[in-house]
Image (cartoon, rainbow, N blue to C red):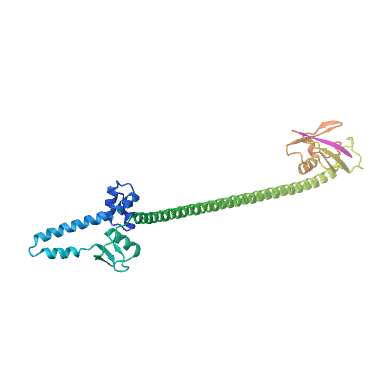
Amino acid sequence: MSSSGDVQMLIEMGFTKDKAEKALSVTGNQGVEPAMEWLLAHGDEISANNTTESGDQSSSNAQLGNTSSAPEIESAAEQVAKSLKCNECGKLFSTQLEVEFHATKSGHSDFSESTEEKKPLTEEEKVEQLKKLEEKMRQKRKEREEQEKQEAIERERNRIRSGKEMAAAKKKLEDEEIKKIVEQRRREKEEDRLAKERVRQQIEQDKLERRKKFEGATAETKAPAAAAVPAASPVSPQPSKDYTQTRLQIRLTNGSALTQTFGSKEQLSAVRLFIDLNRKDGSREFSLMTNFPKKVFTEDDYDKPLDALGLVPSAVLILTNK
Protein backbone atom coordinates (compact mmCIF):
# COMPACT_ATOMS: atom_id res chain seq x y z
CA MET A 1 0.00 0.00 0.00
CA SER A 2 1.39 3.36 -1.04
CA SER A 3 2.25 6.03 1.52
CA SER A 4 -0.22 8.91 1.60
CA GLY A 5 2.70 11.33 2.09
CA ASP A 6 4.44 10.09 -1.08
CA VAL A 7 1.20 10.26 -3.07
CA GLN A 8 0.59 13.82 -1.89
CA MET A 9 4.11 14.89 -2.85
CA LEU A 10 3.73 13.46 -6.36
CA ILE A 11 0.37 15.23 -6.70
CA GLU A 12 2.03 18.52 -5.68
CA MET A 13 4.55 17.96 -8.49
CA GLY A 14 1.75 17.81 -11.07
CA PHE A 15 0.93 14.11 -11.32
CA THR A 16 -2.58 12.78 -10.92
CA LYS A 17 -3.51 10.71 -7.91
CA ASP A 18 -4.12 7.55 -10.00
CA LYS A 19 -0.75 7.82 -11.74
CA ALA A 20 1.04 8.57 -8.50
CA GLU A 21 -0.48 5.52 -6.80
CA LYS A 22 0.32 3.33 -9.84
CA ALA A 23 3.95 4.50 -9.99
CA LEU A 24 4.44 3.85 -6.26
CA SER A 25 2.85 0.42 -6.61
CA VAL A 26 5.01 -0.55 -9.61
CA THR A 27 8.23 0.57 -7.82
CA GLY A 28 7.33 -1.35 -4.66
CA ASN A 29 6.57 1.75 -2.57
CA GLN A 30 10.26 2.58 -2.28
CA GLY A 31 9.70 6.34 -2.17
CA VAL A 32 9.02 9.38 -4.32
CA GLU A 33 12.21 9.38 -6.40
CA PRO A 34 11.85 5.82 -7.86
CA ALA A 35 8.17 6.50 -8.60
CA MET A 36 9.02 9.81 -10.30
CA GLU A 37 11.73 8.18 -12.43
CA TRP A 38 9.29 5.48 -13.48
CA LEU A 39 6.67 8.08 -14.46
CA LEU A 40 9.17 9.99 -16.60
CA ALA A 41 10.44 6.81 -18.23
CA HIS A 42 7.02 5.27 -18.93
CA GLY A 43 4.92 8.35 -19.63
CA ASP A 44 4.75 7.47 -23.31
CA GLU A 45 3.68 3.92 -22.50
CA ILE A 46 0.86 5.22 -20.32
CA SER A 47 -0.35 7.46 -23.19
CA ALA A 48 0.05 4.62 -25.69
CA ASN A 49 -2.00 2.31 -23.52
CA ASN A 50 -4.66 4.98 -23.22
CA THR A 51 -4.60 5.45 -27.01
CA THR A 52 -4.82 1.68 -27.60
CA GLU A 53 -7.75 1.41 -25.27
CA SER A 54 -9.45 4.28 -27.06
CA GLY A 55 -8.70 2.61 -30.44
CA ASP A 56 -10.15 -0.69 -29.29
CA GLN A 57 -13.25 1.06 -28.10
CA SER A 58 -13.58 2.90 -31.42
CA SER A 59 -13.11 -0.38 -33.33
CA SER A 60 -15.82 -1.97 -31.30
CA ASN A 61 -18.12 0.89 -31.96
CA ALA A 62 -17.32 0.70 -35.70
CA GLN A 63 -18.21 -2.96 -35.81
CA LEU A 64 -21.51 -2.29 -34.14
CA GLY A 65 -22.44 0.46 -36.64
CA ASN A 66 -23.89 -0.34 -40.02
CA THR A 67 -23.21 2.94 -41.91
CA SER A 68 -19.36 3.07 -41.57
CA SER A 69 -17.18 2.66 -44.65
CA ALA A 70 -13.49 2.13 -45.38
CA PRO A 71 -12.84 5.66 -46.73
CA GLU A 72 -14.37 7.20 -43.61
CA ILE A 73 -12.18 5.04 -41.41
CA GLU A 74 -9.06 6.10 -43.28
CA SER A 75 -10.11 9.76 -43.05
CA ALA A 76 -10.69 9.38 -39.32
CA ALA A 77 -7.29 7.76 -38.91
CA GLU A 78 -5.65 10.73 -40.53
CA GLN A 79 -7.45 13.01 -38.03
CA VAL A 80 -6.30 11.10 -34.92
CA ALA A 81 -4.74 13.44 -32.36
CA LYS A 82 -1.02 12.90 -32.07
CA SER A 83 -0.38 15.37 -29.23
CA LEU A 84 -1.93 17.81 -26.78
CA LYS A 85 -1.44 21.53 -27.24
CA CYS A 86 -1.49 24.45 -24.80
CA ASN A 87 -3.55 27.14 -26.55
CA GLU A 88 -2.03 29.81 -24.26
CA CYS A 89 1.66 29.25 -25.01
CA GLY A 90 1.57 26.83 -28.00
CA LYS A 91 3.63 24.05 -26.43
CA LEU A 92 3.01 20.43 -27.46
CA PHE A 93 2.78 17.52 -25.04
CA SER A 94 2.76 13.86 -25.82
CA THR A 95 1.12 12.65 -22.60
CA GLN A 96 -1.58 13.78 -20.23
CA LEU A 97 1.03 13.63 -17.49
CA GLU A 98 3.08 16.35 -19.19
CA VAL A 99 -0.04 18.47 -19.63
CA GLU A 100 -0.87 18.24 -15.94
CA PHE A 101 2.68 19.08 -14.95
CA HIS A 102 2.74 22.08 -17.29
CA ALA A 103 -0.64 23.28 -15.98
CA THR A 104 0.56 23.04 -12.40
CA LYS A 105 3.83 24.84 -13.14
CA SER A 106 2.51 27.61 -15.45
CA GLY A 107 -1.09 28.00 -14.34
CA HIS A 108 -2.36 27.51 -17.90
CA SER A 109 -5.72 25.81 -18.29
CA ASP A 110 -6.61 25.98 -22.01
CA PHE A 111 -5.54 22.75 -23.75
CA SER A 112 -6.75 20.92 -26.87
CA GLU A 113 -5.86 17.89 -28.99
CA SER A 114 -3.56 18.42 -31.95
CA THR A 115 -2.62 16.38 -35.04
CA GLU A 116 0.92 17.64 -34.71
CA GLU A 117 3.31 15.01 -33.50
CA LYS A 118 5.65 15.84 -30.69
CA LYS A 119 8.96 14.14 -30.80
CA PRO A 120 9.55 11.86 -27.80
CA LEU A 121 11.97 13.02 -25.14
CA THR A 122 15.55 12.06 -25.71
CA GLU A 123 17.57 10.51 -22.94
CA GLU A 124 19.23 13.86 -22.32
CA GLU A 125 15.86 15.60 -22.05
CA LYS A 126 14.60 12.93 -19.68
CA VAL A 127 17.71 13.36 -17.53
CA GLU A 128 17.26 17.14 -17.57
CA GLN A 129 13.60 16.87 -16.60
CA LEU A 130 14.50 14.43 -13.85
CA LYS A 131 17.06 16.88 -12.53
CA LYS A 132 14.43 19.61 -12.47
CA LEU A 133 12.04 17.41 -10.53
CA GLU A 134 14.80 16.41 -8.12
CA GLU A 135 15.67 20.06 -7.64
CA LYS A 136 12.04 20.77 -6.92
CA MET A 137 12.00 17.93 -4.41
CA ARG A 138 15.14 19.29 -2.74
CA GLN A 139 13.56 22.73 -2.60
CA LYS A 140 10.41 21.36 -1.00
CA ARG A 141 12.50 19.34 1.45
CA LYS A 142 14.51 22.45 2.29
CA GLU A 143 11.34 24.47 2.82
CA ARG A 144 9.96 21.74 5.08
CA GLU A 145 13.18 21.60 7.10
CA GLU A 146 13.21 25.39 7.40
CA GLN A 147 9.62 25.33 8.59
CA GLU A 148 10.44 22.63 11.15
CA LYS A 149 13.44 24.69 12.27
CA GLN A 150 11.28 27.78 12.72
CA GLU A 151 8.73 25.75 14.65
CA ALA A 152 11.51 24.39 16.90
CA ILE A 153 12.81 27.93 17.49
CA GLU A 154 9.31 29.11 18.34
CA ARG A 155 8.84 26.21 20.77
CA GLU A 156 12.16 27.09 22.42
CA ARG A 157 11.10 30.73 22.69
CA ASN A 158 7.83 29.71 24.29
CA ARG A 159 9.71 27.45 26.70
CA ILE A 160 12.12 30.25 27.67
CA ARG A 161 9.28 32.74 28.03
CA SER A 162 7.35 30.28 30.19
CA GLY A 163 10.48 29.68 32.30
CA LYS A 164 10.99 33.42 32.78
CA GLU A 165 7.37 33.89 33.79
CA MET A 166 7.65 31.06 36.31
CA ALA A 167 10.90 32.52 37.70
CA ALA A 168 9.31 35.98 37.99
CA ALA A 169 6.29 34.54 39.79
CA LYS A 170 8.56 32.58 42.15
CA LYS A 171 10.67 35.68 42.89
CA LYS A 172 7.52 37.68 43.60
CA LEU A 173 6.36 35.08 46.10
CA GLU A 174 9.81 35.03 47.75
CA ASP A 175 9.82 38.85 47.99
CA GLU A 176 6.38 38.83 49.57
CA GLU A 177 7.49 36.17 52.04
CA ILE A 178 10.60 38.21 52.93
CA LYS A 179 8.43 41.28 53.49
CA LYS A 180 6.20 39.29 55.81
CA ILE A 181 9.22 38.04 57.79
CA VAL A 182 10.68 41.57 58.06
CA GLU A 183 7.33 42.95 59.20
CA GLN A 184 6.98 40.16 61.76
CA ARG A 185 10.45 40.86 63.16
CA ARG A 186 9.71 44.59 63.32
CA ARG A 187 6.55 43.91 65.33
CA GLU A 188 8.43 41.56 67.64
CA LYS A 189 11.14 44.17 68.24
CA GLU A 190 8.52 46.83 68.94
CA GLU A 191 6.71 44.54 71.36
CA ASP A 192 10.01 43.72 73.07
CA ARG A 193 10.87 47.41 73.35
CA LEU A 194 7.49 48.20 74.86
CA ALA A 195 7.84 45.32 77.33
CA LYS A 196 11.28 46.59 78.42
CA GLU A 197 9.88 50.08 78.77
CA ARG A 198 7.11 48.78 81.02
CA VAL A 199 9.66 46.90 83.14
CA ARG A 200 11.85 50.02 83.39
CA GLN A 201 8.89 52.13 84.44
CA GLN A 202 7.93 49.52 87.02
CA ILE A 203 11.49 49.53 88.41
CA GLU A 204 11.46 53.32 88.62
CA GLN A 205 8.10 53.18 90.39
CA ASP A 206 9.42 50.60 92.84
CA LYS A 207 12.50 52.74 93.55
CA LEU A 208 10.33 55.79 94.13
CA GLU A 209 8.10 53.88 96.53
CA ARG A 210 11.13 52.51 98.41
CA ARG A 211 12.65 55.98 98.61
CA LYS A 212 9.43 57.38 100.05
CA LYS A 213 9.24 54.49 102.49
CA PHE A 214 12.88 55.03 103.48
CA GLU A 215 12.36 58.75 104.03
CA GLY A 216 9.21 58.08 106.08
CA ALA A 217 11.00 55.49 108.22
CA THR A 218 13.91 57.89 108.80
CA ALA A 219 11.56 60.65 109.98
CA GLU A 220 9.71 58.29 112.30
CA THR A 221 12.99 57.03 113.73
CA LYS A 222 14.36 60.47 114.53
CA ALA A 223 11.31 61.55 116.57
CA PRO A 224 11.20 58.60 119.01
CA ALA A 225 14.95 58.63 119.33
CA ALA A 226 14.96 62.29 120.37
CA ALA A 227 12.20 61.65 122.95
CA ALA A 228 13.89 58.57 124.33
CA VAL A 229 17.19 60.23 125.22
CA PRO A 230 15.96 61.99 128.41
CA ALA A 231 14.26 58.81 129.62
CA ALA A 232 17.35 56.64 129.21
CA SER A 233 18.74 55.02 132.32
CA PRO A 234 21.65 56.99 133.78
CA VAL A 235 23.58 53.79 134.27
CA SER A 236 23.50 52.79 130.54
CA PRO A 237 26.61 53.72 128.61
CA GLN A 238 25.80 56.43 126.08
CA PRO A 239 27.90 57.44 123.09
CA SER A 240 29.25 60.93 123.04
CA LYS A 241 26.59 63.47 122.12
CA ASP A 242 29.06 65.02 119.74
CA TYR A 243 28.45 62.08 117.32
CA THR A 244 25.26 63.15 115.55
CA GLN A 245 26.24 61.23 112.39
CA THR A 246 28.07 58.07 111.49
CA ARG A 247 29.80 57.04 108.27
CA LEU A 248 29.20 53.44 107.26
CA GLN A 249 31.08 51.37 104.65
CA ILE A 250 28.93 48.49 103.43
CA ARG A 251 30.71 45.60 101.70
CA LEU A 252 28.46 43.70 99.27
CA THR A 253 28.57 40.00 98.47
CA ASN A 254 30.28 40.61 95.08
CA GLY A 255 33.22 42.46 96.67
CA SER A 256 32.05 46.01 95.88
CA ALA A 257 31.25 48.52 98.60
CA LEU A 258 28.74 51.28 99.35
CA THR A 259 29.58 54.26 101.56
CA GLN A 260 26.87 56.43 103.13
CA THR A 261 26.46 58.83 106.09
CA PHE A 262 23.52 58.21 108.43
CA GLY A 263 22.19 59.94 111.49
CA SER A 264 23.49 58.31 114.67
CA LYS A 265 19.89 57.92 115.87
CA GLU A 266 18.64 56.22 112.71
CA GLN A 267 17.66 52.61 113.05
CA LEU A 268 19.60 49.78 111.46
CA SER A 269 16.47 49.13 109.32
CA ALA A 270 17.19 52.42 107.51
CA VAL A 271 20.59 51.01 106.51
CA ARG A 272 18.95 47.82 105.23
CA LEU A 273 16.49 49.86 103.14
CA PHE A 274 19.38 51.88 101.70
CA ILE A 275 21.14 48.64 100.73
CA ASP A 276 17.97 47.31 99.02
CA LEU A 277 17.73 50.44 96.90
CA ASN A 278 21.37 50.64 95.86
CA ARG A 279 22.91 47.18 95.86
CA LYS A 280 24.14 45.69 92.56
CA ASP A 281 25.09 42.20 93.68
CA GLY A 282 21.69 40.58 93.31
CA SER A 283 18.43 40.53 95.18
CA ARG A 284 18.88 37.61 97.59
CA GLU A 285 18.03 38.10 101.25
CA PHE A 286 21.01 39.02 103.39
CA SER A 287 22.25 39.50 106.94
CA LEU A 288 24.54 42.24 108.31
CA MET A 289 27.59 41.64 110.47
CA THR A 290 30.75 43.32 111.73
CA ASN A 291 34.24 41.85 112.04
CA PHE A 292 35.73 43.85 114.91
CA PRO A 293 34.13 42.96 117.16
CA LYS A 294 32.44 40.20 115.20
CA LYS A 295 28.70 40.40 115.53
CA VAL A 296 25.80 39.18 113.39
CA PHE A 297 22.78 41.44 113.75
CA THR A 298 19.40 39.77 114.37
CA GLU A 299 15.90 40.92 113.43
CA ASP A 300 15.56 42.61 116.80
CA ASP A 301 18.67 44.74 116.16
CA TYR A 302 17.08 46.36 113.06
CA ASP A 303 14.76 48.39 115.34
CA LYS A 304 17.68 49.79 117.35
CA PRO A 305 19.50 53.09 116.57
CA LEU A 306 23.00 52.97 115.14
CA ASP A 307 24.67 54.59 118.15
CA ALA A 308 23.12 51.98 120.45
CA LEU A 309 24.62 49.25 118.28
CA GLY A 310 28.10 50.80 118.49
CA LEU A 311 28.18 51.85 114.80
CA VAL A 312 29.32 55.47 115.43
CA PRO A 313 31.20 57.56 114.50
CA SER A 314 32.04 55.04 111.68
CA ALA A 315 31.86 51.33 111.03
CA VAL A 316 32.19 48.60 108.43
CA LEU A 317 29.17 46.36 107.74
CA ILE A 318 29.45 43.12 105.77
CA LEU A 319 26.61 41.49 103.82
CA THR A 320 26.22 37.71 103.99
CA ASN A 321 23.59 35.76 102.09
CA LYS A 322 21.04 33.92 104.16
**Residue drawn 83% across and 33% down?**
290
Relative side of 47 to 37, left or right? left
Nearest to the observer: residue 32 or residue 317: 32
Q: Which residues are magenta?
A: 313-320
Residue at position x 19%, y 64% in the image: 78
Q: Position of residue 264 (x, y in %)?
A: 86, 42
Residue 193 coordinates in the image, percent (x, y): 67, 50
Query: What residue occupies the far top of the structure in this picture?
Result: 294
The answer to whether residue 105 is seen in the rendering is yes
Q: Quadrant of residue 299?
A: top right
Residue 292 picture quarter: top right
From the viewer's side, name the closer residue of 270 and 261. Answer: 261
**Residue at the spot x=80%, y=47% of the render?**
219
Front residue of 167 and 297: 167
Point out the image quarter for the C terminus: top right
> At which x and y percent is residue 58?
15, 60
Image mark count: 0
Furthest residue toward bottom: 88
Locate residue 100, reporting x and y percent: 30, 60
- Reply yes or no: does residue 318 show up in magenta: yes
Q: At x 17% / y 58%, what residue is drawn?
A: 55
| Main secondary structure type of the part rendered in magenta | strand
Instruction: State the residue in front, 285 or 153.
Output: 153
Whether residue 311 is visible: no
**Magenta-span inclusion, residue 12:** no
